[in-house]
Every structure is written in structure tokens, then in C-alpha cells.
Image (tube, helix red, strand yellow):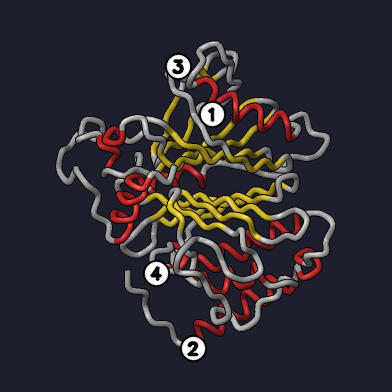
């Protein structure tokens, strides 16, 4: 993808915006800090959203690697090795992945390097794991809608980045419909849950509910507490269960799928657990090879209230050959520029 040229005022806006965000959290970004704080993670989420909207990956990565969390010379003082995924300064274990493909975040192949018009975003912050989750919905992005789930993990002792991984979905991915996702997400309410509220659950309870959801795919004896409105946003469609008179949501499940490679972000304050997983059998063209997937749950009073999914495929519409979508037109190998090539290559190399 050819990136549009930017006037000098555009870069000046980037510099001032990111400097303001990072300088506001200089204390929390100090590597000598003894613990990972919520304010540190929230500042990183804000930096990420701003950087993605401007397509300025270099400035964002530089700000993460700066010893005091300050942004200096944005976009000009970060270099990457050509032979592998690791930065060659400050954070040698830093890994960046999109749909399980290891990339340099500052390369032309990185979605982070592309400016995206963001219509909606939501973040969660996990101080135990020193990790954050952000959902981006870009339905009105000119010519290329996206729904992106991003998980960022940091060292709790140094606050240096350990991993940034994204499930980047667009046309042809599982039930993809950014406009539908945006419309449904805007109808939901995910407020902070007060500390003494009966709706608030513990860290362990929230994570256990996310695990129960995925465990149910392989074990019919697992119970998954789920309440109204009994809808999950899958791709961009509202997948509805059966809501009983007692307020229990009954879903239909398979019982033979083992879902591996679970990575978590848990936030008790907003009742959220996001789980990055590998989902076997999602892309029919790939057999049982697990596909990159993220599920973010809103939990209230020990039950699922909301659920959003983002799932990436290799073949267009996950190799369903039109049987699900009702049309065979345009099926087959996806062709959305560089991303089609990257995905196909990833599975041949066995990055999972």
C-alpha cells in the first residue's frame, strides 16, 4: 500500500499530540517504577489509538522504547534488524505480530503504518499482567474498513514492551461487517463497575468465565453463565441465543473443539476479559489449523453480558464457498493487496 504524503503541519500535529500524551504520564513510564499502573496502561492505549489514526508507527514505537516515556524526534530514531522480528535497541525481546505474522511495526506491511479513520474504540487495562487491550472499529475509513483487536504486553519491572499483537480483520474475514459492528457496539453500555457493586466480579472470576466459554467448545458438561441481551457480535452480525423467562441465555455449541493458545487481558473495573486464541476449523480451507481470533467479554454479576469477536481467515470468507453467505461470486483466494500475500505465507511457514 502506498502511503499518502503528509504536509509538515500533519507531522507537527502528531508530535504535539503524542508529546502531550506521553509527557502527561512521564512518571508512570519511568522504567524504575516498581509496578505497572493503570494510568501507565491507559496512557499507552491513548498513544496507540492516536498513532494508528495517523499511521505513525515509528513515533509510537519510539515513545514506547524511550527510557522516560517521552517522545523525541518522532519517527526518526528507531531502527530494526532485517533478519528477524526484534528491535535492535532497548527492548531486544519486543515482538510485533499481526494475525500471527511477525512483522516490523514500522514496515510498509504493518497496518500500524497506515492511517486509519477510527469511528469507535474501547480499551481495557490489566495491571497484573501489565497488558492492555484495544478494540478499533473503522467503518468509514475511506476504501478499506477495518475491525482491529490489539493486545499489548509490557514488562512489569521495566515497563518496556514485550509484545504487541493484533487481529486485523477486513473484507473477507469471518462475517466481517464493520458497519454492522459499529452500529451494534454503539448500542451497548460498558461503564465502570463500582467497587462495591454486586455487578462487579473479581479478576479470577472474570477470567474463569472467559475460559468457561472456550472450554464449552470441547466439553458439553461445562456451564457458561450468560444473561441478557443474549447477543454476541460475531464479525458484524448479531448472533442471538435463546433468552429464557428466568433471564438465562441459551446458546448452541459444538462439543469437540479444543481452543488453544489463550492470552488474556482482564480488567475488573470495567468487567472485561479479552482472550487472544487460535480457533481450529474456522477457515474451512485450512482444515483444523487454528486461525487468529480475539473474543472480548463484558461480565456483570457473574454472567456474560456482551461479547465481540474478531477472527482472521486465509481464504476469502473462510473457505465457505458461498454456502454461508449465499453467493459464490468473488469466492476463492483473497485479494486485498499485501494482506492476502501475508496471510497465505503465514500459514505455509507455520507461524502458529
Q: Which mark is residue 255?
A: 3
Element assignment for label 1: loop
Q: Which mark is residue 3?
A: none
Q: Nearer the viewer, mark 3 or mark 2?
A: 3
The answer to whether any part of residue 182 appears in the image is: no
* Residue marked by disc 4: 108
Q: For marks 1 and 2, give the CA distance.
A: 48 Å
User: Which residue is the site of mark 2?
Assistant: 8
- Which residue carries the number 1 mark? 229
Proximity of marks 4 and 3: CB atoms separated by less than 8 Å: no
CA distance for labels 3 and 2: 56 Å
Rounded to the nearest whole Å, what is the CA distance between mark 4 and mark 3?
41 Å
Secondary structure type for disc 3: loop
Q: Give the crowd class for mark 3: few <14, some 14-19, many >=20 residues within 10 Å.
A: some
Q: Earlier in the sequence, mark 4 or mark 3?
A: 4
Q: x%, y% of residue 73?
A: 61, 83
Left or right, 45 with respect to 23, comes to: left
Q: Position of residue 181 (x, y in %)?
A: 43, 45
Name the residue rendered at 42%, 30% in the picture.
Answer: 239
Q: Nearer the viewer, residue 103 or 221?
A: 103
Mark 1–mark 2 contact, CB under 8 Å?
no
The residue sitting at 71% across, 50% down in the picture is 130
Amino acid at each position: 500500500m502506498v502511503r499518502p504524503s503528509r504536509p509538515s503541519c500533519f507531522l507537527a500535529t502528531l508530535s504535539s499530540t503524542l508529546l502531550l500524551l506521553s509527557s502527561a504520564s512521564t512518571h508512570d513510564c519511568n522504567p524504575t517504577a516498581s509496578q505497572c499502573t493503570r494510568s501507565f496502561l491507559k496512557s499507552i492505549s491513548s498513544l496507540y489509538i492516536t498513532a494508528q489514526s495517523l499511521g505513525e508507527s515509528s513515533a509510537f514505537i519510539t515513545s514506547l522504547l524511550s527510557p522516560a516515556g517521552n517522545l523525541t524526534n518522532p519517527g526518526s530514531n528507531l531502527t530494526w534488524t532485517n533478519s528477524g522480528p526484534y528491535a535492535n535497541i532497548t527492548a531486544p525481546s519486543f515482538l510485533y505480530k499481526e494475525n500471527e505474522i511477525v512483522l516490523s511495526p514500522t514496515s510498509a506491511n504493518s497496518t500500524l503504518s497506515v492511517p486509519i479513520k477510527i469511528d469507535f474504540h474501547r480499551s481495557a487495562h490489566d495491571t497484573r499482567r501489565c497488558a492492555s487491550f484495544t478494540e478499533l472499529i473503522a467503518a468509514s475509513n475511506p476504501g478499506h474498513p477495518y475491525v482491529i483487536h490489539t493486545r499489548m504486553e509490557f514488562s512489569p519491572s521495566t515497563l518496556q514492551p514485550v509484545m504487541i499483537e493484533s487481529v486485523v480483520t477486513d473484507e473477507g474475514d469471518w462475517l466481517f461487517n464493520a458497519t454492522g459492528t459499529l452500529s451494534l457496539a454503539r448500542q451497548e453500555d460498558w461503564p465502570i463497575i463500582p467497587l462495591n457493586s454486586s455487578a462487579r466480579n473479581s479478576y479470577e472470576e472474570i477470567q474463569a468465565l472467559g475460559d468457561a466459554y472456550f472450554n464449552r467448545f470441547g466439553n458439553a458438561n461445562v456451564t457458561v453463565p450468560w444473561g441478557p441481551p443474549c447477543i454476541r457480535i460475531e464479525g458484524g452480525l448479531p448472533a442471538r441465543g435463546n433468552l429464557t423467562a428466568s433471564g438465562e441465555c441459551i446458546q448452541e455449541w459444538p462439543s469437540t473443539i479444543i481452543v488453544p493458545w489463550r492470552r488474556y487481558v482482564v480488567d475488573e473495573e470495567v468487567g472485561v476479559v479479552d482472550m487472544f486464541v487460535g480457533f481450529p476449523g474456522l477457515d474451512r480451507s485450512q482444515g483444523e489449523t487454528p486461525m487468529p481470533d480475539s473474543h472480548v467479554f463484558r461480565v456483570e454479576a457473574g454472567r456474560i453480558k456482551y461479547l465481540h469477536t474478531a477472527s482472521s481467515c486465509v481464504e476469502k470468507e473462510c473457505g465457505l464457498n458461498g454456502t454461508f453467505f449465499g453467493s459464490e461470486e468473488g469466492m476463492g483466494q483473497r485479494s486485498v493487496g499485501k494482506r492476502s500475500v501475508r496471510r497465505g505465507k503465514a500459514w505455509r511457514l507455520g507461524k502458529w
